[in-house]
Image: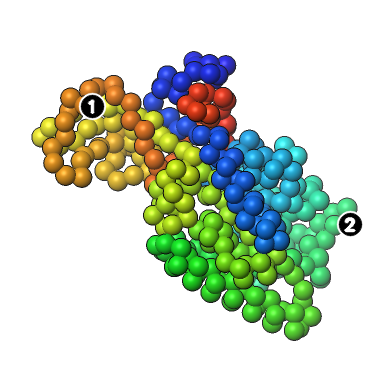
Amino acid sequence: MLGSVMEGDCITTLSTPVMVVDVDVVKRNAERMRGHWTKLGVTLRPHMKTHKTLECGDIMTGGSRRCIVVSTLAEAGFYADHGYDDILYAYSVPFDKVERCALLAERLSLFQVLLDHRDALEQLRKRPLTDGRVWHSEGVELTGVYAHCGNTYGCRGAEQIHAVARETTTLVLQFMEKLKAVGISCKSSIGSTPSCSQPISDMAKLSEVHPGNYVFFDVQQSVIGSCGLEDVAVRVLSRVIGHSPHRNQLLLDCGWSALRLLSMTQEHGRVEPLSGQLDYSRYPLGTLLTIIPYHACATAMMHSVYYVHSGGRLVGKWTPTRGW
């Protein structure tokens, strides 16, 4: 049972607005990304922040439940509660959350945090770990160097993505050499969905990469050049609830509380043609529209459940964790 609908039902029977996930596309995206990095001999550490679900996490990790990145401690605790380990909290450690980080470090075989300031290091030292565990050298050990490569989000096309990926990779590797020169050996981790979807050969020199959005993709990624629209695994279903001929617009039951797009209020959305007049006879009230999200992460955050389908038929639902 899926609430008021059943497995095998067509997704058009769902009450709108609702987010639907094509599990076949999700699996294809995950397999493609895994293939890129297996070929280059680099560890893939997938980011969970886009979907925040167990089911999608299992697909991204190939069922291993190991080696993931999270953006909140709520996610870290959620995955730890369900048997995941080797978790990297990719967020500069908030001082009010040091105790929660320490509890996870004491509980898991490997829990890693990010530091970007000397004061954060002092905060960790003030909270030593128990049971013989340590944050490492003098209580703290440098495990690796982490870079996001987020400026790929300003790119358009593979050539620009490659240029940013090459610059980031070069800078990180140069910094690793400087660390090595003073006797510090650690791993390197970079990544964003654009750079990891269009990898360059030099990235084979890295220890690991950490993309996340690739499992869903979205319109933004297609504009950047990370994917095609056929690779976007998520849609928001919405219905026409009003005609506004004086504005040449349709009114939808989907606002920014279900989808992040322009020309929206909290619970309503407005659609207008790129040119010309709308033919309202094509869109009678109740017409179901399928909308491709511009940003899958922001859209997913608006939904407490994702309805999962294969070939348009429901196969289950995924419930994401929430909070910080």
Disc nearest the viewer among 2 and 1 = 1
Left or right of 136 on screen, residue 46: left
Towards the viewer: 63 or 18: 63
What amino acid is labelled 2 in the image? Gly
Is disc 1 placed on a helix, strand or loop? loop
Q: Which mark is residue 132?
A: 2
What amino acid is labelled 1 in the image? Tyr
Q: Residue at x 47, y 55 (%)?
A: 226
Residue found at the very far right of the displayed protein: 132
The span from disc 2 to disc 1 (Cα, nearest Å) is: 66 Å
Locate residue 300, reporting x and y percent. 48, 40
Query: Which one is earlier in the sequence, the residue at label 2 or at label 1?
Result: 2
Is disc 2 placed on a helix, strand or loop? loop
| Label 1 crowd bin: few (<14), some (14–19), many (20+), radius 10 Å | some
Q: To which residue does mark 1 refer?
A: 283
Locate residue 218, reporting x and y percent. 44, 46
Q: Residue at x 39, y 40 (%)?
A: 292
Quadrant for the N terminus in the image: top right
Left or right of 170 on screen, residue 155: left
